[in-house]
Image (spheres, rainbow, N blue to C red):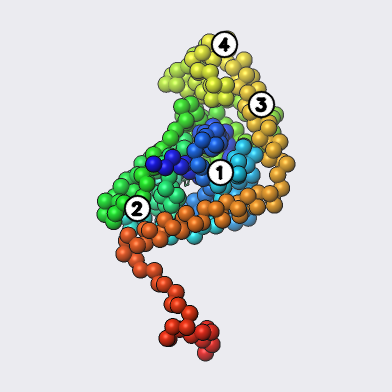
Amino acid sequence: MSNRRISGFKPTGPLQLGNYLGAIRPVIEAQHRQPTTVFVADLHALTVPHDPARLRELTTQVAGLLLAGGLDTRSTILYRQSDLPAHAELHYLLECVASYGEVHRMIQFKEKGGGSGTRLSLLTYPVLMAADILLHDIAEVPVGRDQRQHVELTRDLALRFNERFGPVFTVPEAVLPQVAARVADLSDPTAKMGKTNASTNGVLFLLDPPDVLRRKIMRAVTDTGTEVVYDPERKPGVSNLLDLLSAITGDKSEQIAAKYENYGSLKAATADAVIALLEPIQRRYHELTPQDIEQALAQGAAQARERADATVSRVRNAMGLTTAQPAPAGSPGTPTTAPTPR
Ligand code: TYM
């Protein structure tokens, strides 16, 4: 039974602390125990309005931050999704297994889609995500809570495919971190911290300088009252800060709450912890050159390609598609040189 893992990161904006605590760190911590593949999901970034030059820049930045965060390319495969055409091919084949109703129900489409200019790819995006996962015979998908529904859809598609066409896919499951599965925006604790949130005041970007991180944390929206208690329902702002500290220190949020007299001292401690966490990542990131990053991505694509192509070929066969075999050299009707176009 495989215990292989995969995770993807969409270059729609600079990576933020939720990405790190929710997915990057869990992936990196387990990479020497479980075979791991990580990719920059640049095809997914095309589902919303985008600027080509900015997409290129963010793709490199996301890959660089994964490397700076500790991704070890000696054991872990890191690649850029669009380098492997197998993603797009399997996406289409799985669209022929998925139903309109089930993708239309996905929460992220309901939240972000709807207008007449909405790209069709935003609707079918969860099927591309299923393709990303199913290409690689994956057992576990470490993700934040917002992606759990997409992994559920992936399971449904894998099971349906296997039932209809034979046992081709491994059926994966989502793995969420115990703390920080949904880091909230500091200026609106009811919303998720996200790369593309309209205001960046409550989003802690991994490359924010220390003074910016401190300012954002000191200005975090807290709740009525003055007492530091862990109560996500009634005190979502304070509880979010406690969860951040808990994810960083490993202590329980309730125990951390008991250590602080007021919101100010809790915020100062959170700022210190976040800055100390990100400092080495930022330092390593700034030491990397674009060539280092490109080289890592090229090596990863070469490693991932064979497995991905083999999966697509199994899927094509199972679905009844025939792959033309190259005719043996010199057989009748085979031109030895290409015909001259007229
Ligand atoms: P993306 O790029 O939005 O986020 C990357 C990862 O970070 C997690 N995450 C969070 N975790 C906790 N708190 C937060 N505030 C927070 N914000 C983001 C996400 O859950 C995710 O794990 N569709 C995916 C990318 C993707 C993918 C895949 C992931 C494409 N194909 C295959 C896994 C497997 C996405 O948009 O992630």
| 3 and 4 marks in contact (CB < 8 Å) | no
Residue behind mark 3:
276
Answer whether residue 57 is visible to the viewer in this image: no
Q: Which amino acid does label 1 sit on?
A: Thr
Q: Point out the frontmost of discs 2 and 4.
A: 2
Amino acid beneath label 3: Ala
Mark 1 crowd level (few <14, some 14–19, many ≥20, 10 Å Cα): many
Residue ID at (63%, 55%): 53
**Dot 2: element:** loop
Give the vertical position of 307 relative to 282 (above or below). below
Q: Which of the labelled discs sits on residue 259, or is there none?
A: 4
Amino acid at the residue labelled 4: Lys
- Residue 7: image tag: none
- Point out which mark residue 76 bears: 1
Which tag, 4 or 1, sits closer to the chain's start? 1
Q: Residue 168 carries which label?
A: 2
Name the side, left or right, on which 100 lies relative to 290.
Answer: left
Mark 4 packing: few (<14 Cα in 10 Å), some, or many (20+)?
A: few
